[in-house]
Image (cartoon, grey):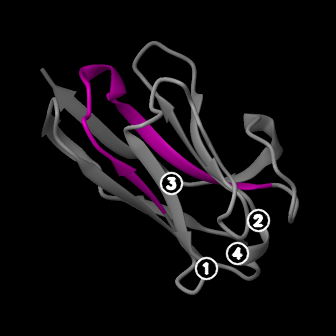
Amino acid sequence: QVQLVESGGGLVQAGGSLRLSCAASGRAFSSYTMGWFRQAPGKERESVATINSNGRNTYYADSVKGRFTISRDNGRNTVYLQMNNLKPEDTGLYYCAKHRYPFLWDTTQNQYANWGQGTQVTVSS
């Protein structure tokens, strides 16, 4: 059974930075696309960033392009989200998730089978 544990959230002022981490248990982490998603209060969960199994392909939501960077360390079974120049609208619960199938690329939420418990990011103005 795969477990995903996020960390690194917190309270930060606008313009600040945070680095989220997601540690995965289980085998074959390096075979799966991983994604970061977020849910703001009163809004639906949305895709933030996605990285393929070898780390060479990435996707970013338009709202975070140029500010967020997704990366992964397959030797450590960990995926990261570096968030710079944070804005109040970035506030939300951030989840990492593992794609349902190995070596497939998709940003659609229903293609992700394993989810972490989330880490809260709050950006004050």
For the residue marked with disc 2, what is the amino acid? Tyr
Q: Marks 2 and 1: in contact by CB < 8 Å?
A: no
Q: Residues within 10 Å of mark 3 (few under 14, many from 20)?
A: many
Q: The residue tagged with tag 4: helix, strand or loop?
A: helix
Residue tagged 2: 32
Q: Earlier in the sequence, mark 1 or mark 4?
A: 4
User: How many other residues sit within 10 Å of disc 1, few (<14), some (14-19) or many (≥20)?
Assistant: some
Q: Which residues are magenta?
A: 80-99
Relative to 93, 105 lies left or right: right
Query: Percent position (x, y) of residue 100?
Result: 83, 55
Residue 66 pos. (x, y %)? 42, 37
Q: Quadrant of residue 64?
A: top left
The reply to whether dot 3 and dot 2 touch (C-beta < 8 Å) is no
Of the image marks 1 and 2, the number of the one nearer the N terminus = 2
According to the image, label 4 marks what residue?
29
Q: Are marks 2 and 4 in contact (CB under 8 Å)?
A: yes
Residue 121, percent from left and from top: 30, 39
Amino acid type at circle 3 is: Ile
Quadrant housing the C terminus? top left
